[in-house]
Image: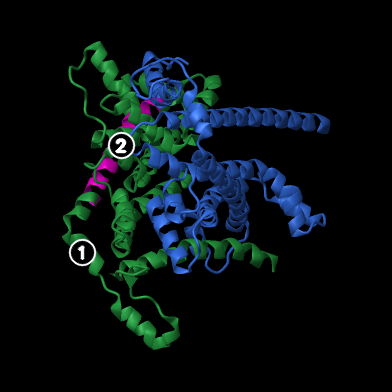
Amino acid sequence: MRRFSWFNATSLTLGFAFLYLPMILLVIYSFNESRLVTVWAGFSTKWYGELFRDQEFLDAAWVTLKVAVFSSTLATVLGTMAAYVLVRAGRFLGRTLFSGMIYAPLVMPEVITGLSLLLLFIGIGLDRGVFTIVLAHTTFAMCYVSVVVSSRLTSFDKSLEEAALDLGCSAFEAFRLVTLPIIAPAVISGWLLAFTLSLDDLVIASFTTGPSATTLPIKIFSAVRLGVSPQINALSTILIAIVTVGVISASIITKRAAVAQARDEQAAIRTEE
Amino acid sequence: MRRFALIAVPYLWLLVLFLVPFVIVLKISLSDVALARPPYTPQLDFSAGWEGLKTFFSELDFENFVFLTTDSLYWKAYLSSLKIAALSTVLTLLVGYPVAYGMARAATEWRPTLLMLVILPFWTSFLIRVYSWMGILSTEGVLNTVLLKIGIISDPLMIMNTPTAVYIGIVYTYLPFMVLPIYSALEKMDESLIEAAEDLGCSRFAAFWLVTWPLSKNGIIAGCFLVFIPALGEFVIPSLLGGSGTLMIGKVLFEEFFSNRDWPVASAVAVILLLILIIPIILFQRNEQKAREAEG
C-alpha cells in the first residue's frame, strides 16, 4: 500500500479514461437527436427505432449470430480434442507439424488467413456463404480454444485420470466423468472466446463470404467507411451493453464458483480430520 | 483406434483448412495473372498426368516477386507498416507500463476489478472500438470542438486520415495486450526487493531502473510482440482512420485482391508479409519458452 502514490493514481485514472472515454462518448451520442456528431440537439432514441426497422441490419445480425453459434461450438469440440492430443496423446507422427498448425493461426495476419481460405474455397468450387464463414471461423477459433484448454489440462493432476482408469473406467468414461468436469471452466471460456472472435471478425468474413451472406461487422464497416453514422452508434451501444453485462455476470459467477469450491475443500479437509 | 480418431479429426481439419490454403497462396504467388476466372494461370491439370505436372511447374516463376521489388508502392507499404507497427508498439509500452504498474501496486482487493476493466474492452468489438475514434478525431469531431471552445487551438487539428490517427487507433485497441503481460510480471514481483534496494541507498528511480524494470522484462517483451505482430498486418485501423495517405501492407493486400483483382500479386504480397513476420514470431516463441523455463 505504501507505494500507491499519486503517480500510480494518476496513471490509472488517465489509462482507464483513455480506454473508456471513446466508448462512453459513443454511447452518449447514440442518443443524440441530430445526425451530426458535434451538435447536441437533445435526447432521442430515434436512431434505435430506425435501426430496428432496418431489415438489412436485422438480417445481418441473424447471419452473424448463426455463424457465431455454429463456429464457436464446432471450434470448442475440435479445439478441446486438439488440446487433449497436444497434452495427453504423447508422441505421434507429425506432432511438431500439428502443434505448429495450432499456434500459427494465432499470429497469422487476418488478411492472409482470409485470402488463403478464399483461394481454397474457389479452388474446390465451394459456394461461398454462411457455410464457408463457419468453416473459416471454426479454423482459427479452434486454435484459441485449444490454447485455453491445454493450459488447464497441463495444470491439473494426471493421476486423477489414472485413478479412474484403474477403478475400471474406459478411456472415454474417464474423460467424461473426471477430465471434462475439471476442465469445464476452460472449455466454457474457450467457447465464449470463440463466440466473441466470430462476432467480431470483419476481415476473414469479408474474404470468405459470398453475396448471400452479410455479417454485422461487414455491414458496419461499409456503413462507417465514409464517416460517423448515428445508426451505427446505436448498434454499438447495444453491443457494448451486451458485452458489459456478459463479462460482469461471468466474473461474478466464476467468483461465486471459486468461493464455493474453496468452502467445499475446507469442508473436505475438516471431515478427514 | 480411438486415439487415432482423436488425433486425426483436428489434424485433418487443420491440414485441409490451414496448411493446404497456404500452399495454394504460395502456388498462386508464382502464377501469372490472366483475364479469366480464376484470374491466374497455370492451373494444375491432374488428368494430364506427369507431363501436366511438369508443364505446370515449368510455368511457375518469381515474376510477381520481381514485380513487387520494382513497384515502389509495395516497398513503401512494407516499410511504412514496419515503421507504424514499431513506433506504435513503443507508444503502447509508454502508455501501458504505468497502467500495469499502477494496477500491480494497487490494494489487493482492487486488483480483480482493475483487471476486469482492462479485459472488458478486449471482449468489445474491435471494429466498434476503432470506429469510436472517428467521431472524436474528425475535423468537426469531439476533440476539435472541445479544444476550439476552450481556446487552445484556433484552427481545427487535422488528425483524422493521417498516420497520427492510426497510431492512436493501434495504441487504443492493443493496450490490453501490453498491460496484461506486464501486470502479471509485476504482480509476481516481491516488493521487499525494492525496499532492500532503497535501504541500500538507491533512489526511488534507481530502484525502479535496477530492480523493477529488469524483473518485468519478460512481460515487456511479450507485450511488445503481442502488439507488434498483429499491428504489422492491420487492415481495419488504417482503412478507417488512416485515409488514403496512410500506406499499410494489410490494406494494400486487401485492395490488390478486391479492387484490382490481381490474385497472383496479392498472394505474393501475403507471402512476403509472412516472411517478414517469421522473425518476430520466432523471437516471441523463444521469449515465452525462456519465461516458462524460468518459472518451472
Q: How crowded is mark 2: few (under 14 residues within 10 Å), some or many (20 or more)?
A: many
Which residue, given by chain and number where applicable, does mark 2 sit on?
B241
Q: Nearer the viewer, residue B136 or B229?
A: B136
Main SS type for the magenta part? helix
Q: What residue appears at the point 46 percent right and 16 percent down from the top-left corner?
A: A43
Q: What residue appears at the point 40 percent right and 47 percent down from the top-left corner?
A: B287
Q: Which residue type does callout 2 highlight?
A: Leu
Q: Point out residue A50 in the picture as x, y percentages from the top left corner.
A: 49, 30
Say which chain tag 2 marks: B
Say which colour chain A has.
blue
| Whole-number angstrom distance, CA of label 2 to CA of label 1 | 29 Å
Q: Can residue A196 be seen in this view?
A: no
Q: How crowded is mark 1: few (under 14 residues within 10 Å), some or many (20 or more)?
A: few
Q: Point out residue A194 in the picture as x, y percentages from the top left corner.
A: 55, 45
Which residue, given by chain and number where applicable, does mark 1 sit on?
B67
Name which quarter of the figure residue A14 lies in. Answer: top left
Q: What element carries label 2?
A: helix
Chain that the image shows in green: B
Q: What residue appears at the point 77 percent right and 55 percent down from the top-left corner?
A: A173
Q: What element carries label 1?
A: helix
Q: Nearer the viewer, residue A196 or B263?
A: B263
The label on residue B99 is none
